[in-house]
Amino acid sequence: MSGIGWSELWAQPGPVLALAPMQDVTDWAFWNLMTRYGGADLYVTEYFRVTETSRLDRHILRSIDENPTGRPASGQLIGNDPVALARAARELQRHPVVAVDLNLGCPAPVVYRKCAGGGLLRDLARVDRILGALREAVTIPFTVKTRIGFDSGRDFDALLGLFTKHAVDLVTVHARTVLEMYRPGVHLEFVARAAEVLRCPVIANGDVDDAARALEVTRSRGARGVMIGRGAIRNPWIFAQTRELAAGLEPVLPTGREVLAYVHALYAATFPPDGEERLQVQKIKKYLNFLGAGVGPEFLHAMRRVTEREALFAVCAVHLDHDAPMALRDAGLAAGG
């Protein structure tokens, strides 16, 4: 476990930078890869699915038990049964986590239709019971990652009231509704509202696309830090760049060849020992969909058509084998979309 504790994390100067939990993406291998590029201050696991009969997923536990980052790790739970969630939280605390996090934001229909993740935001009475059960079970910091509401932000103040009632230690606000999924545009006024009302730190999440955006969100909205997900897949240098900008330095942009080397490293890091090349190519293309938003539509079009490793890296070389610096911003966000 990292020697950096919860208190030390929040005592550091500048914004706290967290890597967002992304299912089937932010596993041990991806955490390990991020450390090569500067890494986050705080890592949150993929969510543990919690039911009456579930046990903690060993694959996800590896990220905690063999934490390769040298930084604190938090374990995230998702479910809708207060008793089962409390049991899972007690089990999770036997592992080296600095906090237990509750997912109140997953927008996947297969999740919210089961009244879990973002689906819980339609039932604040159940959220109240879950928070109470977890607050009683968790003896280390207890945190929540939430959306602003299911289909609107009309109940956001009531939700903040529940977080205060149950003395939540940190709230991450993904400033979209559940039904907005990941469409461009976030409602940062809700981040500001949470920072104003809550007695705990608030982290902003959603459309944090570069270092300037990270600092703008923290300085103008009162957030103590930012949580970055898709932006870190596209640009793993984003954490180091944010620290550089916060220190008054010009962020160092990677060259095309450095981005190309990242793609090769990403392919190798996420290739399981018993994996098949065909399946790995399909898997890596999911990552490259995020990277491609910062490279261009021609790259995206060509990359999506290939099915073999050699062809995939040939496409990458055409677009990335150069020494020009790359900002790797999402073109849609950069255009204000």
Image: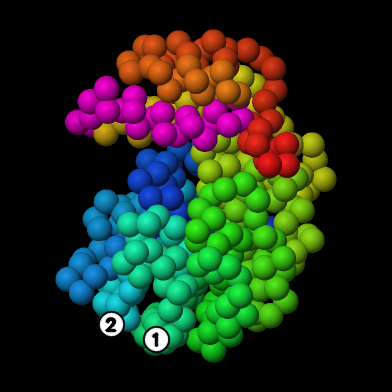
Question: Outermost residue toward the right?
Answer: 248
Q: Identify the image quadrant of residue 192.
A: bottom right
Q: Which residue is mark 1?
A: 129
- Between 150 and 214, the one nearer to me in the picture: 150
Position of 315 relative to 214 (above/below): above
Give coordinates of residue 26: x percent, y percent: 42, 47
Q: Residue at x 41, y 28 (%)?
A: 285
Mark 2 crowdedness (10 Å alpha carbons): few <14, some 14-19, many ≥20:
some
Q: Main secondary structure of the magenta part?
A: helix
Per the rendered image, the range of residues in magenta is 273-295
Question: Outermost residue toward the left?
Answer: 53
Query: Is residue 291 shown in magenta?
Result: yes
Callout 1: SS: helix
| Relative to 233, 29 lies left or right | left
Mark 1 crowdedness (10 Å alpha carbons): few <14, some 14-19, many ≥20:
some
Q: Residue at x 23, y 29 (%)?
A: 275
Is residue 92 shown to the viewer in this render?
no
Q: Residue at x 72, y 76 (%)?
A: 196
Is residue 163 shown to the viewer in this render?
yes
Q: Earlier in the sequence, mark 2 or mark 1?
A: 2
Give coordinates of residue 116: x percent, y percent: 36, 68
Q: Identify the image quadrant of residue 61.
A: bottom left
Q: Quadrant of the C terminus?
A: top right
Position of 163 relative to 173 (above/below): below
Give coordinates of residue 273: x percent, y percent: 23, 31
Q: Residue at x 42, y 72 (%)?
A: 120
Residue 83 is tagged as 2
Q: Amino acid at mark 2?
A: Val
| Relative to 291, 203 lies left or right | right
